[in-house]
Image (cartoon, helix red, strand yellow):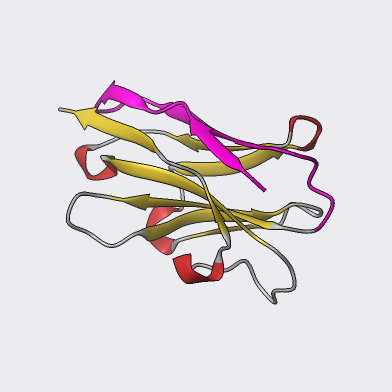
């Protein structure tokens, strides 16, 4: 599985963005798809994830409310919408995929086998 993120950029505080993650090839198994972010000098952190088949979702506690993960199965694309952006959202955002089995959508980077190259989000005040 190859993943390609897009949609990042420079945004003013208070604005919104929708990031996209296009997966090459047809996803035929119940992958867990996750969004992570990594700010300069910080560890990569889980933002949100979903299961490909039943579209169960999971959010990091600190991300609930402003972040929405969704997918378009026909286009093999996962989205992350971010609202009310602030300077703390400035980071590289990564899409990741994990093969089943898993009991719950994983939140640790080492659980995911496939990664995209990332898309930069910069929030200006």
Instruction: Indicate the position of residue 62 as horizontal and vertical percent values.
Output: 37, 58
Considering the image in quadrants, where does the C terminus appear? top left
- The magenta segment is 1-29
Q: Quadrant of residue 75?
A: top right
At 40% from the left and 43% from the top, the residue drawn is: 93
Instruction: State how many labels appear.
Output: 0
- Side of 1 relative to 19 (left or right): right
- Side of 65 relative to 33 (left or right): left
Instruction: Indicate the position of residue 86 as horizontal and vertical percent values.
Output: 25, 37
At 43% from the left and 42% from the top, the residue drawn is: 66
Is the residue 23 above or below the residue 52 in the image?
A: above
On whether residue 6 falls in the magenta region, the answer is: yes
At 81% from the left and 31% from the top, the residue drawn is: 74
Is the residue 102 above or below the residue 39 in the image?
A: below
Query: Furthest residue to the right?
Result: 28
Nearer to the camera, 32 or 16: 32
Q: Quadrant of residue 104?
A: bottom right
On whether residue 65 falls in the magenta region, the answer is: no
Instruction: Indicate the position of residue 123 as horizontal and vertical percent values.
Output: 24, 31
Mark yes or no: residue 108 visible.
Answer: no
Is the residue 73 above or below the residue 102 in the image?
A: above
Mark yes or no: residue 110 visible.
Answer: yes
At 29% from the left and 23% from the top, the residue drawn is: 11
């Amino acid at each position: 599985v190859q993943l390609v993120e897009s949609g990042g950029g420079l945004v003013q505080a208070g604005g919104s963005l929708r990031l996209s993650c296009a997966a090459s090839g047809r996803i035929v198994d119940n992958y867990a798809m996750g969004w992570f972010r990594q700010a300069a000098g910080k560890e990569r952190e889980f933002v949100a994830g979903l299961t490909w088949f039943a579209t169960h979702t999971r959010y990091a506690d600190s991300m609930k409310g402003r972040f929405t993960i969704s997918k378009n199965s026909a286009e093999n694309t996962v989205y992350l919408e971010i609202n009310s952006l602030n300077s703390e959202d400035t980071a590289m955002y990564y899409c990741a995929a994990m093969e089943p089995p898993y009991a719950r959508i994983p939140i640790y980077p080492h659980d995911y086998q496939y990664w995209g190259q990332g898309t930069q989000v910069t929030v200006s005040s």
